[in-house]
Every structure is written in structure tokens, then in C-alpha cells.
Amino acid sequence: MLIFEKSRPGRGCSILPPCDVDVYTPSEKDQRTAPLHLPELAEVDIERHYTELAGKAHGVNDGFYPLGSCTMKYNPRVNEKTAAFSKFTHIHPLQPAHTVQGCLQVLKETEEALCAITGMSRFTFQPAAGAHGEFTGLLLIKAYHLANGDTQRTKIIVPDSAHGTNPASAVMAGMSVINTDSDENGCVDVEKLRQLCEGEEGKQIAGLMLTNPNTAGLFDPNILEITEIIHSCGGQVYYDGANLNAVMGVARPGDMGFDCVHLNLHKTFSTPHGGGGPGAGPVGCKEHLAQFMPGSCVMEKDGELVFEKAENSLGEMKNFYGNFLVVVKALTYIKMLGAEGIAEASANAVLNANYMMAKLRDIYDIAFGTKICMHEFVMDLQSLLKETGVSAMDIAKGLLDHGIHPPTMYFPLTVHEALMVEPTETESRETLDEAIEVLRGLYDLAHSDPEKLHASPLTTPVGRLDEVGAARHPVLKFDFEG
Ligand SMILES: *Cc1c(COP(=O)(O)O)cnc(C)c1O
């Protein structure tokens, strides 16, 4: 039942203090012509309404959530505690820097930590999400080429194993995308890349965007060769580090030759996301790109922290300093783990994914016959579909009946009938064993009673939804007349 349907005229729970300013009456033309429809409920009914709604959703706090590429790990409560500290929340972005030195210190220390983790020279916290970070990084690369008079460098190479946002960001940055196919191992085809960058065509290459680990959960073994090829034709190399929880504390994009990187603080550095709150996609770069950084960077001057614009700043990517409280959460997380813990978190993310993959591979095909994956792996259900008529969608819906959120479906595009599983580092062995048991059970059910899987989920508040209809014809408002 919608909150509007529970509404009763005259009921309510708002007790406002008396108005202590002059009442302002807008002119006739600015006044509403129809009453404002606000739900009128007692506090207890509002409380129950939202508690009931929360119970219908599935979050990390309800159960296993192995949504590939999204890193739905458990985010420690202490992050929320520090972010709620009034000295961080009761401030204004226009306050003079000398009155908010602690906040500048947070930005500075987080920047230093991320530089140490990635091997970059500077970071900006302006980008609000991963894709926004990609866009920012590409504008940095573009500014760099333009400053060098390289106006013809407008093409960006994006391997087909990249995250879907990569080519979209490139187009937004005004570049044209050259798609390269993967080799039979699911990684960049180095010979094809070499051909692309040779001769006259190489002079038009602005750079390459590499998602690593890529969308099949693989660490590209030829990464040094890839950055070398791009640099030798004059291009810049971008590292999509949204999923750095596979490598942080172990390997650094900067050491691999990358010029620029974005990280998803919501994912790797432990901020809730996917409806759970704002994110941050900070962008790091090497010294030669730092002069174009957007917004303001924190610098130390005469013993005081100040904001300073980069020399040839490309402008603003977002107002002020980005989602500051997300940075507070990330710094809390980094400080709680320490250098050792950061590496251990990655090791556990990789271990958990490999454990699940090893316990499933005798019945489910794994994309690219991977022996070792990074933080995630991709199941390929084409043969199951052929044998039983049960699709990746059916298995995903079947998981819902066992209280498990489905993995990412039908992605990456290089694998058909894909289920992309990312258990994350925060899950216990018992949780992984239970999920393995459930997935093995669904495989058997696909052979014994495929109809049941076609009909699932059967235990959730709603059954199988018309997903295309929901996307194409969403009903977003309540019809007061009807
Ligand atoms: C999630 C993700 C992105 C995009 O991040 P958003 O915050 O959703 O914009 C980009 N690349 C990779 C590899 C990702 O996993």
C-alpha cells in the first residue's frame, strides 16, 4: 500500500515552532491552483510504512550480495560514525580555510594515502562517481594533448573487456572510440593493439582505457607491454580502478605505467552505494597531468593548509570539493586497515572469488576457462541453457528464493548467458559454502524441474517483473484523481 493511500486528512505528526519571520504571500500568479498532496499520517504509521518497505528490499545487511563489478561488501559502522561527527557535518563549503583545517587535513591525508596506494602524484575528489571520474580523467588527457598542440589526438582505444561506462565517458569527452577485441584468454590482444598504434593512425591516438582487473575478473598479464605500446605512439594510458579491491596494497597502476586512474570510494573504499548514498570517484594522475586538475587541491603554505587551483585547471567538475563525507568514510576505512590490512583485504577478495569458482567449476562453465581469477569470476550458462532451457536469468531468480541477491547478469557482453560473481572480502567461509550449496542445488533443479526455475522467484514480495516495461514505461507518480 502506498503512503498516499494510508493518508487521512488532518492526521499528522509535525509540530513546528511558531513562525518568527513575516509571513510572505506570493503573488496570485505564483500561487498553487490545486492543493499540495502531502501524505498525512501519524509518526507510528510512517515508521511502520518505511520499516515494511525496508523489509521488502535486499541489502548487504540482509544477506549475501555477490553482484559482480559492484563490490557490495559490508561497510563497517565506524565509517558512518566518523562521517556523522558534527565537526564534519556542521560546516559550510565557503568557510575560510583557516576555520576548517581539520577537514583540509582529511582531504590531504586521503590524497596521500591514495597516492601511496596507486603510485600517482595527485588526486582530485571532485568527481562524484566512477563514470564521472572517467570523464574527468579523459578531459585531463585531452587538455594535455591540446597543450602540446596535438589537436589530432581524438581517438581512444577501449578493449571489449572494459566496463560499459568507459566508451560512454569517452564519447562524452568528445573522443571517438576504437574498440579492440580480446584474445582467446579474454585479455587485450597485444598484436592487434600494436598494429592499431603503428604508422599514421598512431598520431591520432589520445590514449587507451584499461579496466583492470577486466570485466571477466582477469588481471591482464601483458599490462606493461600495453602501456609501453600506447606511450610509444604518444598516447596516455587510463586505468579504471573502480575495483581496486582486487589489487590494492599489492600492485600499483602508477608502477605499471598508467598516467591517470579513477577509484570508486563507494566499492573499494567502503561506502554504501546502489541506493545507499552518494559516492565518490576521485581521479589521480602523474605530475605531467596535475597542472590541469579540476577544482581546488589542498596545499600547505606557511604551516597552514589552503586550497589552490592547478595552474592550467580545466575548471570545475562538481561544486566545491566533491562528496566530502564519502572521503571521511574512505579515510576511516584506510586508517582502520593500515597498509597491511589494505593488502589483506585484496588478498581475501581474491581468495573468496577463487574459492567459490573452484567449488563450482565442475558443473558450471567458467568464462575463458580461467584457472585463477581476481576478485570476481564469470559463469557462462550457455551449455546449461542448451541442455535444460534454464537461462542465466532463471538461475538469478532462483537465487532470490534462497535469500541471495543475484550476481550481475548478461555482463560482460563478451560472454553470453553470463553471471558475474563477486563474493567480496567481507564474507565468511560459511556464507560462501552456503551460496555454493545453493548454486549447486539450482543446477540440479535445472535438470529435474526446469519449470520451477522459470517461475521463480516464488517467495519474494513480488514475483517476476516485467523489467523492460518497468524501464520503458515507469509509473512514477500517484494518480490522485483515479
Ligand atoms: C562501477 C564501475 C564503474 C562506474 O562507477 P559508477 O560509480 O557506477 O559510475 C566503472 N568501472 C568499473 C570497472 C566499475 O566496476
Image: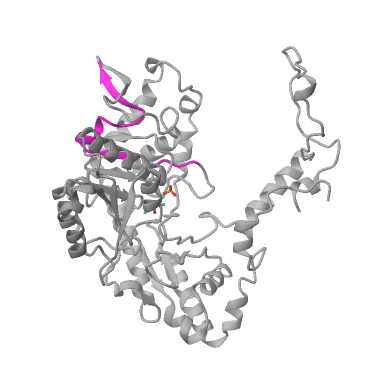
Residue 103 position (above or below residue 39): above
Residue 339 position (above or below residue 36): below
Q: Which contiguous range is marked in magenta?
A: 278-301
Extreme top residue here? Answer: 22
**Position of 263 compared to 147: left or right?**
right
Whether residue 335 is visible, yes or no, is no
Image location of residue 180, percent across then percent down? 28, 61
Q: Residue at x 42, y 82 (%)?
A: 383
Q: Nearer the viewer, residue 372 or 147?
A: 147
Extreme right residue here? Answer: 9
Q: Nearer the viewer, residue 163 or 338?
A: 163
Which image quarter: residue 376? bottom left
Residue 101 position (above or below residue 171): above
Q: Residue at x 45, y 62 (%)?
A: 66
**Position of 261 compared to 60: left or right?**
left
* Membership of 295 in magenta stretch: yes
Whether residue 324 is visible, yes or no, is yes
Which image quarter: residue 194? bottom left
* Membership of 473 in magenta stretch: no
